[in-house]
Image: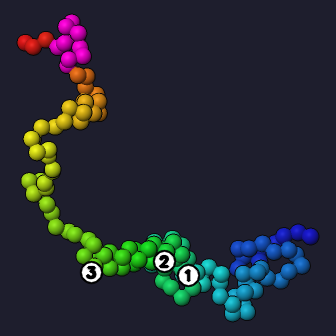
Amino acid sequence: MGLRKCPRCELNYIRDDEKYCNVCKREMKGEPDVEDGVVLCIECGENPVVKGSDLCAICLREARRQEKLSNLSDDMHERGDLSLTSVALDEIEVPLPADGEIPESELDEIDKELGEEDADDLSDDEKPEDD
């Protein structure tokens, strides 16, 4: 049992007992080529489309996600949940204590967060020299 080229297309190999290759048999029956029926996605051009759509599964999923986000944003804007106005820093009010001083306990916390030691805790030789 040896192999020989198909006498019709002279491209594909067939066994000695076969008359034509599978590709030629499909063409003679009028069946479409397997690759001819594949339509690629119009968005990415890489993946086959989902039946009944022009997009592949990945692009279709992304399009639906974007649509949901857009609808959600529109709903929030209509309800007034979304404010697009800008606020200047001088318009923001920060409540301060009545006497205008920051309490000592909060100053210690601020120093700890900034990594600074209290100047009173330093010995004379550790204090920075002023030039």
Return the residue at label 1. 50
What kind of residue is marked 2? Leu
Specify start and end residues of the magenta stretch as a single range: 119-128
The answer to which of marks 1 and 3 sits earlier in the sequence is 1
Residue 6, percent from left and from top? 77, 78
Q: Secondary structure under badge 3? A: helix
- The answer to whether mark 1 and mark 2 are in CB contact below 8 A is yes
Q: Residues within 10 Å of mark 1 (few under 14, many from 20)?
A: some
The answer to whether residue 125 is above or below residue 117 is above
Query: Residue 78 bears which disc, if any?
Result: 3
Query: Residue 121 bears which disc, if any?
Result: none
Query: Of circles 2 and 3, which is in front?
Result: 3
Residue 69, percent from left and from top? 38, 74
- 22 and 56: which one is in front? 56
- How would you classify the magenta stretch by its main secondary structure? loop
Return the residue at label 2. 60
Q: Quadrant of residue 125?
A: top left
The answer to whether residue 128 is above or below residue 112 is above
Q: Locate the C terminus by quadrant.
A: top left
Q: Residue at x 55, y 81 (%)?
A: 50
What kind of residue is marked 1? Val
Q: How is the image coloured?
A: rainbow
